[in-house]
Each structure stands twice: as C-alpha cells, then as structure tokens.
Image (tube, rainbow, N blue to C red):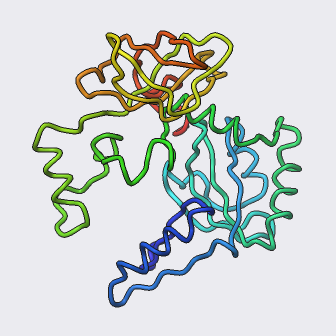
C-alpha cells in the first residue's frame, strides 16, 4: 500500500494454514495480522462495473490501472479496491469492514439497478474462470505441484537470493523441466463435463489427470484444465478424458479461450 505494509488475500477457509506458514517463517521486525473476521467484500464484474462504481465514489477510478489497488470512499463506506477480476471481465474487488458489508451490497445493487446488475454464484464464477484458464488453490495449485508444472514460474524473480525453494526451482528450470505441465482442454463431452481427477489418456496409456472442469457458457465449450506429460503438452494434441466411465475426445487448446489477449479486463 506504499506505506511499508502488504495486504495478502487468500482463502478464508485456509487462514490457519497461511498463519501457520507465517508464524513458522517470521523474521525479526515483521508482523502479520489476520483480518479474516474483520474484513469482507464483493467482486464487481462486467462491462458496466466501472459505471456502477463511478456512481458511488468521487475517487480517481480512471487512475487505477489494471492490477492496481487503492483506498476509496464508496458512499459512506471506506473501502480498499483492487482492479482485478477472476471472471475475465473488467472488474473490481471491493473490500470493506465487516460491519459495512450489508450496506455496501445494498448500495451496489441500487447503483446498478438501471444497468442490469445481478448477483451470481460460485459455480458461475468457476465457469468463467475456466474460460480464462485461471487456476485455483487445491485444484491447479497445491504443495505437490511445482511452479514449472503450473506455469507459476513466470512470477519467480530468478535474481533474488535466499527464498525457500529456490534451489529446487532452478534445478527444475535448468534440468529436464517438469514431468507434467498444466494445459487447457476442449472436451467433446456429451451431457456431462469433467470436474476433477478424471484420467487423461493417450495411446491407451494414462498421461495425466484433470484438475478442474466444467462448461464455458460464453465460448460454448466443455472445458477442462489438466496436468499432462510435458512431451504431450502442445497445442493441438489429441487426448482422451474419461467422464462418467466413457472416454471422450479432448484437444489441447491455447490458454484463455475467452479473450486471450486480456483486452476486456484492461478496458
């Protein structure tokens, strides 16, 4: 936030995991505080998200760059807003004090009433994130998967010394690479979509497994994300995915079948 503090957002249900990690690796002069019971918020997404928010704040939203964050007064509620969205659409994550949560919801719904605002559920969010090939914790990301497997190695600062796992990450990068890589699949499903841990096949042998799957309503495709053998992790590779006991044809497609350039999110 520009004042020597960092706000790390994670799953509410994994707070104890995160705090255990911080407590086990705490350096002198560092303090960590869990705001899980004090803060709440909403994800405001879609082409009219800025128009809704502009009705409620005089803050400089136009100066908030993609992936940026800042403090804004939304109505009478002091908020911290990040310009990001798991849906792949233009959007904001708006965080407020727990006691202001209901008031913030009512303000957003009222401000967007003439713009077609609607509340959406978690399954809709999961469908949208699959269309962007966005991984989530416990599915695409776990302690058992390496950065090279999941593509998270692109965020590693290789010039930095001393971080946990550096030697292993370098060995993977400079060696033969990861045994498996995360890919996006277009599945020829018939009445049922992959959901996770379905086997992926090639030439009669198992070459990987689905990490998550579902239907992409925007792109009108049955999609899945999967970890497959690295030598097969090439766009256009034809594979098979077992869904409800039946092997379905699947093709590796480029990541982010919806708006691959990310222009919509940055609009």
Task: Residue 166: give x, y in percent of width and height.
Answer: 20, 60
- Residue that protrudes farthest toward the left in the picture: 174
Residue in the picture at 78% in, 57% down? 56
Task: Residue 195: give x, y in percent of width and height.
Answer: 59, 30
Task: Depth check: give the residue in front, 86 or 163.
Answer: 163
Name the quarter where the C terminus is drawn: top right
Residue in the picture at 54% in, 55% down? 64
Residue 28 in which image quadrant: bottom left
Image-based side of 33 in relation to 190, left or right: left
Give the vertical position of 219 relative to 138 (above or below). above
Task: Depth check: give the residue in front, 137 or 219.
Answer: 137
Residue in the picture at 30% in, 48% down? 146
- Residue that protrudes farthest toward the bottom in the picture: 29
Residue in the picture at 63% in, 15% down? 220
Give the vertical position of 204 relative to 58 (above or below). above
Task: Depth check: give the residue in front, 13 or 98.
Answer: 13
Figure label count: 0
Give the vertical position of 224 relative to 112 (above or below). above
Residue 9 in which image quadrant: bottom right
Task: Depth check: give the residue in front, 170 or 267.
Answer: 170
Image-based side of 170 in relation to 13, left or right: left
Image-based side of 169 in relation to 154, left or right: left
Image-based side of 168 in relation to 8, left or right: left
Task: Residue 124: give x, y in percent of width and height.
Answer: 70, 35
């Amino acid at each position: 936030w520009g004042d020597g503090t960092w706000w790390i957002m994670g799953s509410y249900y994994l707070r104890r995991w995160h705090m255990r990690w911080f407590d086990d690796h705490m350096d002198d002069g560092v303090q960590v505080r869990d705001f899980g019971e004090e803060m709440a918020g909403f994800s405001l997404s879609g082409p009219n998200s800025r128009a809704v928010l502009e009705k409620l704040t005089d803050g400089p939203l136009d100066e908030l760059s993609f992936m940026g964050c800042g403090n804004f007064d939304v109505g009478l509620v002091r908020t911290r807003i990040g310009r990001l969205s798991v849906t792949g659409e233009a959007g904001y994550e708006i965080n407020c004090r727990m006691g202001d949560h209901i008031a913030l919801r009512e303000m957003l719904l009222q401000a967007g009433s003439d713009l077609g605002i609607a509340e959406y559920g978690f399954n809709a969010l999961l469908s949208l994130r699959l269309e962007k090939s966005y991984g989530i914790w416990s599915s695409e990301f776990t302690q058992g998967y390496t950065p090279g497997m999941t593509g998270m190695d692109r965020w590693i600062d290789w010039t930095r010394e001393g971080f946990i796992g550096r030697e292993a990450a370098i060995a993977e990068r400079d060696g033969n690479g990861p045994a498996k890589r995360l890919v996006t699949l277009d599945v020829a499903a018939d009445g049922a979509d992959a959901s996770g841990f379905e086997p992926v096949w090639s030439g009669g042998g198992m070459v990987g497994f689905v990490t998550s799957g579902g239907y992409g309503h925007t792109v009108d495709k049955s999609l899945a994300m999967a970890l497959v053998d690295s030598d097969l992790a090439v766009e256009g590779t034809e594979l098979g995915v077992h869904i409800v006991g039946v092997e379905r044809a699947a093709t590796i497609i480029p990541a982010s079948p919806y708006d691959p350039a990310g222009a919509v999110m940055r609009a």
